[in-house]
Image (cartoon, rainbow, N blue to C red):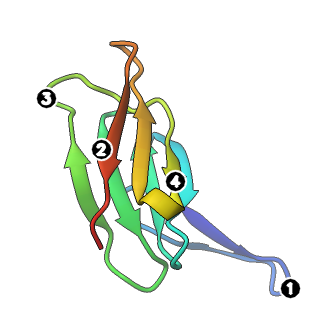
Amino acid sequence: MLSVDYEEKKITRFIENTDFIDGLVSDGRGDYFISDFLGALHLIHPKKKKIKILDTTAENVIAADIYFIIEKRLLLAPTFLDNRIVAYEILK
């Protein structure tokens, strides 16, 4: 993931090791959830270390995209290969 500063015309690394990102959504509190096409979900923030909150790579369950319902603290992840929508309650 990269960050672009338009005024200074500078591109820098924003979050390391985030290949194959498919979903990006705010948690409503300044952090973001990202999903990747390999099966991982992470919580990210530009000034904090990336936190892996779920990894379904071994089960071959891949989040095609994600959506977060802030009021209910539910992260919805449609799966790419098995045609389901999985809901995860985010406790924070």
Q: In the figure, residue 55 lies in which quadrant?
A: top left
Secondary structure found at label 4: strand
Q: CA distance from mark 3 to mark 4?
A: 27 Å
Specify whether 30 is left or right of 59.
Answer: right
Question: How far apart are the two marked residues, 1 and 4, measured between alpha carbons?
Answer: 33 Å
Any part of residue 16 in sight? no
Residue at x 58%, y 65% (from the top left corner): 2
Task: Report x, y in % for residue 32.
Answer: 49, 65
Residue tagged 4: 69
x, y percentage for residue 71? 51, 63
Q: Is 91 or 20 nearer to us in this picture?
A: 91
Q: CA distance from mark 1 to mark 3?
A: 43 Å
Q: Amino acid at mark 4?
A: Ile
Q: Would you name the residue on which mark 2 appears?
A: 40
Identify the mark nearer the N-term, 1 or 4: 1
Residue at the disc numbered 3: 58
**Which comes before the other along the chain, label 3 or label 2?**
2
Spatial separation of the CA atoms under disc 1 and disc 2: 33 Å
The mark lying in front, picked from 4 and 2, is: 4
Mark 1 is on which residue type? Answer: Glu
Residue 7 is labelled as 1
Q: Position of residue 86 (x, y in %)?
A: 34, 32
